[in-house]
Image (cartoon, grey):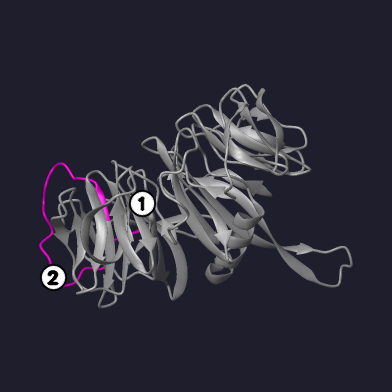
Amino acid sequence: MSKFNRNFIFLAILLTLATSIVVSQNIKPKTTKKETQVIKRKDIVKPLIAYLKNDKWYFLDQKGNLLFEPLELLDVLGYSEGFFRVNMQFNQKPKWAIIDLKGNITVINGINYLFNFHNSRALVTKLKKKQNTSDTATEPEQVFGYINYEGKLVIPLMYEDATEFSEGLAFVKNKNIRGFIDTNNRLVIKLENMAGNTFKNGIADVNDKNFLNGFIDKSGKIVIPLEYNLLEHFSEGLAFAVKGDTFGFINLRNKFEFYIDAYVSKPFSDSVAFVGKLIKQKMKWALINRKGEKITDYIFDDVKEFSEGVAPVLKDGRWFFIDKNGHEILSNDYNYIDKFVDGLAWVSLRNGKRGYIDHNGNFVVELPEAVKYFDFRLNRKVY
């Protein structure tokens, strides 16, 4: 787990200190008078969004129907594998909880942070006191474990570092174990003096004690040498890499396909990618093709990666969509937009209208004014 992620978790879990033993408690959601009809059906479609209005969170499917009665929650933070990840007030204390698609709530006690589910396991962390070498003061440290869909701890809080599961494996580390475990807590890949991250398309990024990066396969064999200062995961056969003063994209044969004058990159999608660099102390983004040729110059202030042939971009204070040639499409007076998923994209207009449009720019799901909105397809807040 990166230093950034560890610091983020540490700050987050200070806000949600909990009890000492991990157990789960199933409770029924509090119901109120209906503001929107809850549609009864055998086949529940995918969840789309939750929004906070009048101190209650409303959970909608992709047709704009309520999944269950609105709930009083502190925050909504994610969706994965049939469960929503939330904070809630329980017995006058903030608690982490998971909610299924019918609105049944399972409170997870004894943890300080909860991640989304991957491969039927959710990473959890807990702060505990650690005596320092002077024995005159204490400082907190984190321990990591994993819960199942029932909210039960199935892999103990025994690791000092860990990642979420991906492709059935997760990197973990303590005094005795360093490597990748399976969902039954069996060590599958043993690592020596390396830290691991997530698997994608059969390979995982790892780094050594000098923070040089490479990739291993599921047998533990190094397939891309640990020689890069920065190395992103492959997308469409290319990975953004930094090696000394060299910036560019490498292929699966560990050869630079082309070099670029950028410092950061979004993954390739639909055969194009955004790359960024600082210009006059501001991050600017350009669009390139698979040959590294610029389709646009560094003209965008913010970007989302391409999906379904379209990308949201911010330029000169205005959000709009572009196609793979950099041309503006679906023009409107947008206040904020996000990427297309399953044929829908979140938009908010300056006139206050907000919700989801299709590829013709027509509103499919329109939403009321609310305090917060959380898109479950993107697992992030939208505005």
State which region is magenta: 26-48
Q: Which residue is mark 2?
A: 35
Q: Whole-percent x and y of residue 347?
A: 25, 61
What is the secondary structure assignment of the residue under circle 2?
Answer: loop
Residue neighbourhood size for the residue with mark 2, other residues' Cα within 10 Å, grouped as few (<14), some (14–19), many (≥20): few
Residue at 77% of width from left, 69% of height from top?
A: 138
Mark nearer the N terminus (1 vs 2): 2
Quarter of the image that includes the C terminus: bottom left
Locate residue 97 relative to residue 242 in the image: left or right.
left
Q: Which residue is mark 1?
A: 378
Q: Is residue 94 above or below residue 313?
A: below
- Asked whether residue 73 is drawn in magenta, I would say no
Indicate which disc residue 350 carries.
Answer: none
Question: Which residue lies most toward the right here?
Answer: 134
Residue neighbourhood size for the residue with mark 1, other residues' Cα within 10 Å, grouped as few (<14), some (14–19), many (≥20): some
Q: Nearer the viewer, residue 90 or 161?
A: 161
Q: Is residue 289 above or below residue 345?
A: above
Q: Whole-percent x and y of residue 158?
A: 66, 46
Residue at 59% of width from left, 67% of height from top?
A: 11
Q: Nearer the viewer, residue 316 or 46?
A: 316
Q: Amino acid under label 1? A: Leu
Q: CA distance from mark 1 to mark 2?
A: 26 Å
Residue at 56% of width from left, 32% of height from top?
A: 182
